[in-house]
Image (spheres, coloured by chain):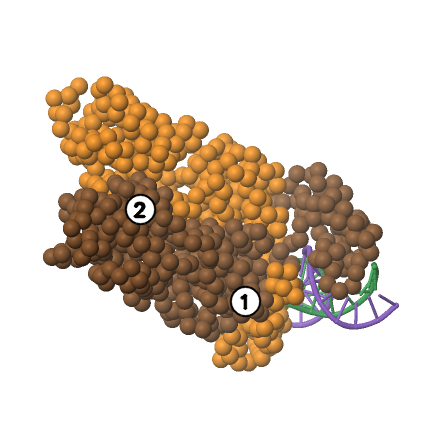
Chain colours: A brown, B orange, C purple, D green
DNA sequence: CTGAAAGCGCTAACAA
DNA sequence: TTGTTAGCGCTTTCAG
């Protein structure tokens, strides 16, 4: 009797009036059978033309009639029936650690748009790092998803094994994973851009607030930053590792700046770290950018409204989400697409937290 | 041949080995038929016990056998089949204007959790205010959702009419709507709490940055704020209306502070407005909280890391999302639940942007 | 109290 | 080129 357990939609008029479904509001419930009847063909023929006949050609005449009927009756296939027959769900799961984080929200947005364009649904599940993905397991158990996009930061955890054990096709998003299909942005290039920009502003003694070393993106950003420093022949950046949180960034800033010979510019390899670092700099009375420059990895609307506005590296996370969907489709198609990368280059967004190195005397180190 | 159009999951072993599904990894594909066989009963009997028999009682003995079989074989119903038979989707649509906005993200989180606990899926669709909800229409057309949660800020638009015309059961979230089921938080109480807190700090001349007057929450927050001022017998707050964006908040702050006799405390009725206002105050050289106090409606992690940290009113948006799901279930059950409100009271989160009124001489106005 | 049978709406062999 | 048939996995009358 209740929706949760039983059929409830019987409020809606399911009785089909074959001919005027388009004019009836609340209608549009034409089934394949109806359009077949309307076109004067068998239901299977109708199915064939609507699906783009696989082998046998359908005559132009009947094709036209069926199409016209489908159009008139506003035919829309019932996905439950279709999916049941096709033994699939027509949906992907997307696992992210934190919905409120602008980066993940952007990634979700990209995935949603790409999937929508292909008639696929995306079932988002938020699972904090370290927590068990109960809800997602249920989606698998219920046959509600055909595959899974895993976008959690930390390295493959026990929950990933569960999905693997259950044969769920999986693509790892925003991180590499041994022997699994992955999609990433060019973290190294983003970090390198940050360093080069600092260099152009005259900074030679630079620091980096990195993330946990078991987080793949953290490693790659750090690598890119250090490599770029090596390339330009400036001293190895001092590093302080913190959680990818505002508090982590704040502590790391304190740590870096307590050096007797502190950096003149710091790269925060994560948005929240950067915000935390900025806040802490203010608490220390460090003027930005006069005494210290700050560049952060990643972008969000709020970064324009911190004081000062953050200079930042924008990465194409929306495209990453879209690519992830395409990649999973490939996997489901049996192709082995692995280690894809979004080619769109990182973008420097000018704020006011990066300024010229005032300490010119030391610039030549 | 391709996933998007055809069956692809045939990589997976669909052949059932009735007895050892539990031990086979990648298995757990037991169907109802299998557990019926295992329990030595007819498939319909198995269905009855698993669904909690509607009328006819099932003997304790068979019930036990079926349950045991289901447990052994790790039976999980196929939702596509179930939904097809039940003529429903087992999923809700959730329409929000902006995924990256922390408030909506929190709302989504609440909805997701509530739905998960009930075995329902939530299909999130992001539709910027004023845009057409193409993707969502498709979900309806494809019979992928049983109902819709609309959480866009602006008043009912053309797209809402489309869904209504198509008989999609709808609940409006975070706003009132004429004659439709709605769920809201106590915006008035939140705004009133802001005002009373300012009052307690000695402020008498207060201002409010409100939102567009065609946005329901903006109206209610403004009402709550003004009513509270009336109750306490202080002058009517000066209002500046802005978009619910950082830029809107910034302009509104400039406008309020250009008054010859400016307020000593300002209430920003939206998080982004508050962030914009804070930024602009800094640009004007207005020291917060020494020269001007600021309280913002709504909460987010970053508010702790602005400079100074924002004093703010936290509203239970996660509970709002959960309530929305429950409300839609009610509607689908035929009950007419309307204008529900989350009872959890607003919460004051102390930051550093609210301070005592230094302008004591004027406090008694 | 349980079995038999029909069918949700759709697709895909196999025939004709 | 098109029609016939079977069936995806499940629920639910209707008999017995």
The quadrant of the rendering that contains the N terminus of chain B is: bottom right
Task: Give the labeled residue for mark 2.
Answer: A311
Report which quarter residue B173 is drawn in: top left
- Which element is circle 2 on? strand
Q: Position of residue B237 (x, y in %)?
A: 28, 23
Q: Residue at x 50, y 36 (%)?
A: B130
Q: Which numbered mark, 2 or 1, is in the foreground of this view?
A: 2
In this picture, residue B300 sits left or right of residue B216? left
Task: Give the labeled residue for mark 1.
Answer: A331
Comparing A26 with B56, the one in front is: A26
* Tag of residue B165: none
In this picture, residue B186 sits left or right of residue A328? left
Mark pair 2, 1: CA separation: 38 Å
- Mark 2 and mark 1 in contact? Answer it, CB < 8 Å: no
Q: Chain of mark 2?
A: A
In this picture, residue B43 sits left or right of residue A95? right
- Which element is circle 1 on? helix
Q: Residue at x 52, y 67 (%)?
A: A337
As drawn, B361 above or below A68: above
């Amino acid at each position: 009797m209740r929706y949760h357990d039983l059929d409830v939609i019987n409020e809606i008029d399911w009785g089909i009036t074959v001919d005027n479904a388009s004019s009836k509001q609340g209608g549009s419930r034409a089934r394949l059978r109806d359009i077949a009847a309307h076109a004067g063909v068998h239901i299977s023929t109708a199915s064939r033309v609507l699906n783009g006949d696989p082998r046998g050609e359908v005559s132009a005449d009947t094709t036209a009639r069926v199409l016209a009927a489908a159009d008139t009756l506003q035919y829309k296939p019932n996905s439950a029936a279709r999916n049941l027959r096709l033994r699939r769900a027509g949906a992907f799961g997307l696992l992210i650690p934190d919905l409120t984080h602008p980066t993940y929200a952007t990634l979700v947005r990209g995935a949603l748009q790409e999937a929508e364009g292909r008639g696929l649904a995306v079932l988002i599940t938020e699972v904090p790092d370290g927590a068990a993905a109960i809800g997602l397991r249920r989606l698998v158990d219920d046959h509600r998803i055909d595959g899974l996009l895993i976008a959690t930061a930390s390295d493959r955890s026990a929950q990933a094994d569960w999905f693997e054990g259950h044969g769920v096709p999986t693509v790892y998003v925003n991180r590499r994973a041994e022997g699994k299909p992955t999609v990433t942005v060019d973290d190294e290039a983003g970090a390198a851009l940050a360093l080069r920009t600092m260099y152009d502003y005259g900074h030679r003694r630079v620091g980096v607030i990195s993330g946990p070393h078991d987080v793949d993106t953290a490693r790659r950003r750090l690598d890119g930053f250090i490599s770029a420093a090596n390339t330009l022949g400036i001293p190895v950046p001092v590093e302080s590792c913190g959680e990818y949180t505002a508090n982590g960034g704040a502590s790391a800033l304190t740590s870096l700046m307590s050096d007797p010979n502190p950096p003149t510019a710091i790269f925060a390899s994560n948005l929240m770290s950067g915000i935390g670092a900025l806040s802490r700099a203010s608490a220390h009375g460090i003027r930005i950018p006069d005494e210290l420059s700050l560049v952060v990895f990643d972008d969000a609307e709020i970064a324009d409204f911190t004081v000062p506005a953050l200079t930042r590296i924008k990465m194409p996370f929306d495209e990453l989400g879209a690519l992830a969907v395409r990649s999973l489709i490939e996997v489901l198609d049996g192709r082995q697409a692995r280690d894809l990368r979004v080619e769109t280059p990182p973008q420097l967004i000018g704020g006011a937290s990066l300024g010229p190195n005032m300490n010119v005397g030391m610039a030549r180190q």
